[in-house]
Amino acid sequence: MSDPWLPAMVVLSSLLPGLIIFFLAETRIRLRTTLNLTGALVKLGFIGVMLWGVQNGREYVFRHTVLPGIDLVLHADALALLFVTLSAVLWLFTTLYAIGYLEGAPNRSRFFGFFSLCVTATVGVAMAGNLFTFFLFYELLTLATYPLVVHRGTDKALRAGRIYLAYTLGGGALLLIGTVWLYGLAGQVDFIQGGSLSALPPEAAGQLQLIFLLLIAGLGVKAALVPLHGWLPMAMVAPAPVSALLHAVAVVKAGAFGIVRVVYEVYGIEFAQSLALLLPLAIAASITIIWGSLRALFQDDLKKRLAYSTVSQVAYIVLGVSLFGPIGTIGGLVHLVHQGIMKITLFFCAGNYAETLGIHKVSEMDGVGRRMPWTTLAFSLGALGMIGVPPLAGFASKWYLGAGALEAGMPWALAVLAASSLLNAAYFLPILHRAWFKPANDAWPDEKIPQRGRWETAPLLLIPPLATAVATLATGLFAGAAFSPLSWVELIAVREYLAWIP
Amino acid sequence: MTDFLDPLPWLIVLPLAWGTLAFVLGPGRGGRLAVAAIALQGALALQLAGQLIDSGARVYAVGGWGASLGIDLMADGLAVVMLLLTQAVALPLAVYARGYFAASPKGRELFWPLTGFLLAALNALFLSADLFNIYVTLELLGLAAVGLVAIAGGTQPVTAAMRYLLATLLGSGAWLLGVALIYGTYGSVSLAVLTPLIHSGAPLAVPLAAALMLAGLLLKTALFPFHFWLPPAHGGAPAPVSALLSALVIKATFYLALRLWLELFLPLTTVAAAQLLGALGAAAILWGSVLALMQSRLKMLVAYSTVAQVGYLFLLFPLATQVPPAAAESALAGGVMQAVAHGLAKAAMFAAAGSMIVATGRDDIGHLGGVGVRLPLTLFSFGLAGVTLMGLPPSGGFSAKWLLLGSALETGQWWWVVVMIVGGLLTAAYVFKVLRRAFLPRAAGDRVARVPRTLEFSAFALALASILLGLFGAPLLELLAVGRAA
C-alpha cells in the first residue's frame, strides 16, 4: 500500500474547481471552461496512474479518522477504478457537451459548480472504502444533483425536484439505519473482497437479513428498482447533460454500484447466498427489467422513453450481481460500464434533437436522419447496442449475463433477458425506422440551430455523442483487449472468486 | 504558571470589562473592541482546552480562598467544550453584528454592552462550581437575553421580551427554590461537597428539589411544551441577537440539566423520568418541525427549527440512563455534538436569514426569489447550515445523529430511531422550502440589494465550521471525555 494521497486527489480535482466556479461571475466563461477542463484532465491523469498501479497489484488507501471507530476511507481497488474511470471519462465528454448546450443560458456558474460537486460525489461513491464513507458521498450526491434537476426553475422542474428529494432522502434514511445497525453489530465494516460478515455468530443471521433489506431498499431508490423508480422518469425535465450524467454515471449507477459493494464486499457473495438473499434480489431485478421495458414502449416523449429504458437496463447490473457465479458477476459489472456509454450517447442525441430542431417526441422524429445524419448514426449505434446486437457493447453484457444465468442454475433469468431484448427492440427499432426511412414533415417543431456547411448542429454538441458512439462500438469489438472494460472486470471477478474462473 | 495568567478567571472578567466599556463609550460603540476581545477569549478557551487535554480537569479558587468561604471555578471537558462553542459562535457573530447594525441600525444602541454581559454570564455559568453561583449567572444571563430581545423596540419585540422575561424569571425562581431545599438539607451549595452526600442518601426533599430545578431549566431551554416563549422572542429580535440566543443561551440551561442528571442527581434518575424527557424531546422534534414547515416568515421558520432541534438534545437522556456504559458514552457524545453542531449551524442560519432580510427588505419566504443570484454565498451558507440540521453527512449534525442512532439501536430503543429519521426528513422539507424559493428568479416588483461582505463571510464561516466539525470532530470528543469517570 502506498501513496494514500492519490485517491484524495481524484476527489479534490473536481471538488476544488467546483467550489471556485460557484463564485465566478457569469461572464467569466473562459476561466470557467479552463477550470472545468483542467479538473477533468487532471482527474484522468491521476486515474491513469492508479489504473497502472492496480493492474500491477498495488493498492491506494486514504484513511482519516472522523470519530473514534469511524474512518473516512478512500480505497482505489480494481472495482472502484472501474467506476471511477467510467465517471471521469464520461464527465469530460459531458462537460464539453454542457458547455455547448448551455451557451448563453443563465446561471451557468451555479450549474457547473453543482455539476463538479456531482462528479466529486460520484468518484467518492466509487472509491468509498467502507459503508460510512459510501453513505457520506451517496448523500452528497443527492444534494449536488437536486439543484441540477430543478435548474430550469419551472413548476414542472420544481415538482420533479420535490419528488426526487422525497425518494432519495427517504432512501438515504433507510441506508443510514442499516449502516448504523451494521456498525453496531460488526464494528467498522470495510469493503473487502469476499466480505467480512460471515465471521459473525449464526444468531445474527436474522438481523443481517433485515439489515440487507434496509440497505438494498435504500440503494434501490437511486438504482430505480421497481417500485422505487418513480422519481427517475420525472427527473428527465432536467437539462440534457444532467439527464445524461444522471442516467449514465451519477445517480442510478451510484445505487447499482452500492448494491455491488454490499453483496460482494460487505456480505460476500457466498455468505449472501447462504442467507438466501440472492434469489429475492434476482426476482426484484427481473421484475424491474420487464416493467421498465413495458413502460418504455408506451412513451411518446423521447427522454421519458429513454428514462424507462434506464430503469430496465440498470436492473441488468443488479441481476448480474445476484446470479451466483463468476460469469454473472462479469456480465453485471461490465454492463455498469457498457450501459453508461450507450445511455449517455442516447441522451446526448436526444438533447441534440431538442436543441437543434425542437424535437421532444418520438412522433416528431420522422425523417430526422437526413437532416442530422451524424447524430442519428450515433443514436442508432446506442440503440442497437442496448438491444444487444453484436458486435456492440450491449452484446457482450447480455452474453455474459445469459451464460451466468445458466451457470447459476436460473434458466428463467435467461427468459427474462430474452423477453427484455425483444422489448428493447420493440421500443427502439420504431424510432430508428422513423428517423431513417420515413419522409420528413414540412417543418421541424422549432429549428434553433440552422445547418452550417457540414455541421448539422453546434460542434460541441456533435462531438461528444460521436465519441461515445465510437466507444460503444470499440468496447464491443475490442472487448478482449487489455484494459478494455471486459478484461478489467474479469480481473475483478478473478479476485472475487479466488481464481475459479474458466 | 502564575495565577495572573490563568485563563479561567479572565474568561469571565474580559467580557464583563468590554461590556462595561462599551456602555461607557456610548450608544452603538464598542464593536471593534468586542471583536478583538472575543478573539482573545477564544484564544484563552483554546489554551484552557490544551491544559485539560494535558493534565485533566481543573479547579481555580477565586482570590485563593478555596471552597466553602470563597468561590471556586471548575473546568472539566464538558464545560470547556461549551466555552469553546461560545467563543467560536460569538466571534463571527460580532463581526456580523458590526455589519448588520451598520446596514440596519434599529437596536444598535445597547447591543454591545448587553452582549458583553451575556457572554460573561455564559462563561461564568459553564465554570461555576456551586448551585448558588449558577443561580446568579442564570439571572444575569436571563436579564441580558431579555434586554437583547427588547433592544429593537416596538410593540411586537417588547411583548415577546416580556413573555420571555416571565418564562426566565419563573425558571430561575424554580431553580432558587430547589437550591434552598438542598441547602436546607445538606447545608452546602458546592457541587463537590454535595455530590458524595446525595450519592450516599437523599431524603424526600432532594427529589423534590431536583424536580423543581430541572423543571426550571426545561422552561428556560424551551423544551416542548415550554417552548411558547421562544419563537416570538427569537423570531422578533435583530438577527445577531436571534443567533446568539438560539445558538448559545438555550444551550446553557441544557448544559446544566445534563450536569445535574449525570452527576449531582445521578442516584435519583429513573428510566421512567428519562423516557419522559425523551418523549418531550420527540414531541418537540415533530411539533417544531411541522410548525417550521408552516411558517411564511423566514425568521419564524428558523426559530421553530430551534424548537425542534432542542428536542434532539433531550433524546440523550433515555439513551444514557441505566444502559451499558459504552452506549451511554456514545449517547453523551452524540448529545453534546448535537449541541455544538446546532449552535454553529443555527447561528449561521440566523445570520444568513438576517442578510436575506436586509437584502430583500422584508421577512417573507415568498419573496426570496433572486437571492440565489444576488447573494450566492449567503444562500450557500444557509444550505450548509441546513445540511447540519438535517443530519446529512459530512457535518457535525450527522456525527451527532450517527452517535445517537448507534446508541439507540444498541440499547434496543428503536422508537427514538424512528423519531430521529422522521425529524431529519421534516427538517429537509423546511430547509428546502427556503432554498427552492431562493433559487427562483426575482419576482417583478421585488428588490434584492447587495449586503456588506462581512455579513456574507461571517455567516459562511459559521456554516463551514458546522460542516468541518463532522470531519474533524474527534478532538472535541477527546476533550469531552476529560474529567469523566469512565
Image: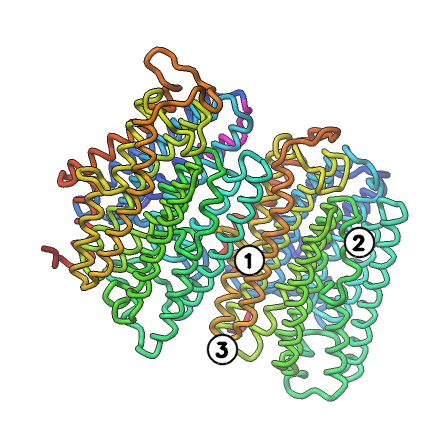
Q: Between marks 2 and 3, how big is the CA–CA gap?
A: 41 Å
Q: Residues within 10 Å of mark 1 (few under 14, many from 20)?
A: some
Whether discs 3 and 1 lie on one chain: the answer is: yes
What label sits on residue A87 in the rendered view? none
Q: Residue at x 54, y 63 (%)?
A: B334
Q: Which residue is mark 2?
A: B232
- What is the magenta segment's predominant secondary structure? helix
The CA distance from mark 3 to mark 1 is 30 Å
Along the line of sight, the residue nearer the viewer: B32 or A29: A29
- According to the image, label 3 marks what residue? B324
Looking at the image, residue B425 sits to the left or right of residue B150; the answer is: left
Indicate whether residue B443 is drawn in magenta: no
Q: In the image, residue A266 lies at what x, y percent?
A: 31, 62
> Mark 2, residues whose alpha carbon is within 10 Å: few (<14), some, or many (≥20)?
many
Q: What residue sits 24% from the left and 33% below the top?
A: A471
Is residue A278 left or right of A481 when viewed as pictured?
right
Q: Looking at numbered disc 2 in the image, what kind of residue is underneath it?
A: Pro
User: Which residue in the structure is indicated by mark 1?
Assistant: B51
Number of the front mark, 1 or 2: 2
- Apparent side of residue B243 relative to residue B29 in the rendered image (left or right): left
Chain of the residue where label 3 is placed in the rendered structure: B
In the rendered image, residue B315, in percent from the top left (x then y), is placed at 60, 68
Report the span colored magenta: A17-26
Whether residue A211 is visible to the viewer of this picture, yes or no, is yes
Please, what secondary structure does the residue beneath circle 3 have?
A: loop
Cβ atoms at labels 1 and 2 below 8 Å apart: no
* Disc with the residue nearer the chain's start (3 vs 1): 1
